[in-house]
Amino acid sequence: MPTLAAECDEVILLAFTTEAEMKRLAEEFYEITLIIGGDVGQASQFAQEVNQSLVVFTTNEARTVGEISFKRRGEVLKKQDFDIHMLYPDVKQDPELISLSKDFKKYISTASLEVDNPDRVDPGAIPGVTSTAHYVGSQSCAQCHAEETHIWKASGHGHAFKTLVDRGSQADPTCIGCHTVGFGEPSGYQRAFGDSKLVDVGCESCHGPGSEHVQSWLAGTKPSFEFRPLGPGDCKSCHHGEFSRPFDWDIFWPKIAH
C-alpha cells in the first residue's frame, strides 16, 4: 500500500463487502482516501470519516447511484458534497449492464444451486426441532376463507410472482424468497419444479405452513394450534429498505386488510 500510494494522487478502494469490513480496512490502511462499498442493505445517508478515509456505500440492487465531490485543502482531500440518487424508471439503463443482466438471468435459470436441494439443512432452523407441518398452497386455504381469498387475489401479493416473470427474474434466488411460498425450505417452492400452487405471496408466506390446520378442519376436528398473531415486524422481512422506500404499516396494511 505505501508503494501504491506513492505512485498515485489518491487511492480509492472499491470493496464489495460489509460496512463493518469497510471500516476495518479504513482503520488498517490510512493511505486510502475513499472506500466505496456495496454489500449492504441500503445506501449511505452520509459519508463516514474513519481514520484518514471516507467510507460510503450504495446497494447491489442497481437502485441507487452515489455522487461525491472533493476539494483539496493543502495535502488533504476534503469532502465537499455527497448525495445518493434513486434510480427511478425514467433513468435510462446502460446497454452494457442490460446485456450483463440478461446473461446472468439466462445462466441462473439453469444453474444448480444449494438452495435447490430439498434435503439441505435449513440455516434458519432451530437445532433439534423438526416441523411437522408443510406448505399446501393458498388454494387449500380458500376452501374456508373465501372472503380473505378474494381480498388476496385483488392485492399485489396475489400477483407477486408475475412481477418477476415480467422482468425475467423468476429463477433468481435473491428475488424468489419474497415472491413465493416457503422458498428455501424442504416443502416450499422449488425452482426446478415451478410449483404453481406455491407462487405469489400466499397465506403461508406470512402465517407459516398450513397442512395440519387444513387436515384438522377436513377431518372435522378443531385444530390443536392457532397461527401466531402477525405485525409490522413480519412484513419487514421482505418490505425493508429500498424495497418499500420506506415501509409504513398504516399505509400498507389497508391494502391487504383481512
Image (cartoon, rainbow, N blue to C red):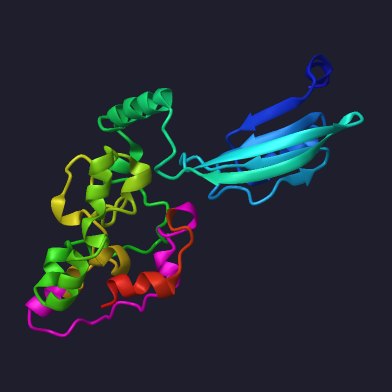
Residue sitting at x 19%, y 66% = 154
Judged by its main secondary structure, the magenta piece is loop
Quarter residue 142 falls in: bottom left
Q: Residue at x 20, y 39 (%)?
A: 192
Left or right of 198? Residue 72 is right
Total numbered labels placed on residues in the image: 0
Tell me residue 112's x, y (percent). 29, 32
In the rendered structure, does residue 230 fall within the stretch colored magenta? yes
Is 51 in front, or is 102?
A: 102
User: Residue 99, relative to residue 130: is it above or below?
Assistant: above
Q: Residue 141 in the image: x percent, y percent?
A: 15, 71
Read off the magenta span. Answer: 214-242
The residue that appears at 78% across and 37% down in the rendered structure is 53
Above or below — where is 213 with respect to 61? below
For the N terminus, the image quarter is top right
Q: Would you say residue 246 sits in the magenta stretch?
A: no
In this orientation, does residue 132 appear? no
Q: Kindly give the residue lying farthest to the front in the view shown.
A: 90
User: In the visual, does 231 lie left or right of 207?
Assistant: right
Quadrant of the image occupied by residue 49: top right
Give the quarter of the figure containing the C terminus.
Answer: bottom left
Q: Residue furthest right?
A: 74
Q: Is residue 183 left or right of residue 236?
A: left
Who is closer to the viewer here, 74 or 178? 74
Query: Picture coordinates of residue 245 (x, y %)?
Result: 47, 58
Q: Is residue 212 visible?
A: yes
Which percent across, then down, holds residue 97? 42, 27
Give 98 or 161, whichever is nearer the viewer. 98
Q: With 72 as the anchor, is 18 left or right in this view? A: left
- Residue at image position (14%, 51%) is 196
